[in-house]
Amino acid sequence: MNDNPHIGESFESFLRDEGICEEVTAEAVRRTLVMQVEQEMAANNISKSEMVRRMKTNT
């Protein structure tokens, strides 16, 4: 048992208790995907407008 009064349950438990675990997880996944796409774009010297063209979508 931990005697430190400042340590509680896990962060995930806190998010579940607050009813926002799924929302926070979805946002984290989205941000991770955006970061990975941006890194690949930079590594391949692809502009945002070129990526939009390749994906056949809007900004």
Image (tube, grey):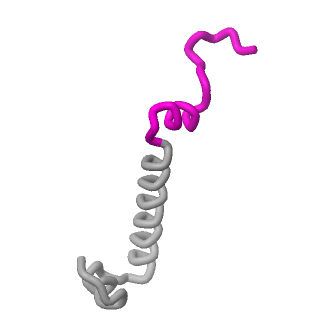
Q: Is residue 28 left or right of residue 8?
A: left
Single out the residue that lies furthest toward the right: 1
Give me the residue at 51% from left, 31% from top: 17
Residue 39 is a magenta residue? no
Please name the predominant secondary structure of the magenta segment in the image: loop
Position of the C terminus, as image quadrant, is bottom left
Position of 35 with respect to 52 (left or right) is: right
> How many numbered callouts?
0
Residue 10, image x, y percentages: 60, 31
Depicted 56 relative to depicted 48: above or below: below
Residue at 35% across, 90% down: 54
Q: Nearer the viewer, residue 44 or 12?
A: 12
The part of the chain drawn in magenta is 1-20
Residue 40: give x, y in percent of width and height.
45, 76
Q: Position of residue 45 (x, y in %)?
A: 37, 82
Reply above or below: 40 against 17: below
Question: Where, by quadrant of the figure, is residue 8 drawn?
Answer: top right
| Quadrant housing residue 34 | bottom left
The x and y percentages for residue 21 are 49, 43
Which is nearer the eye, 25 or 18?
A: 18
Q: Nearer the viewer, residue 33 or 23?
A: 23
Which image quadrant: the N terminus? Answer: top right
Residue drawn 35% across and 83% down? 46
Residue 19 lies in magenta, yes or no? yes
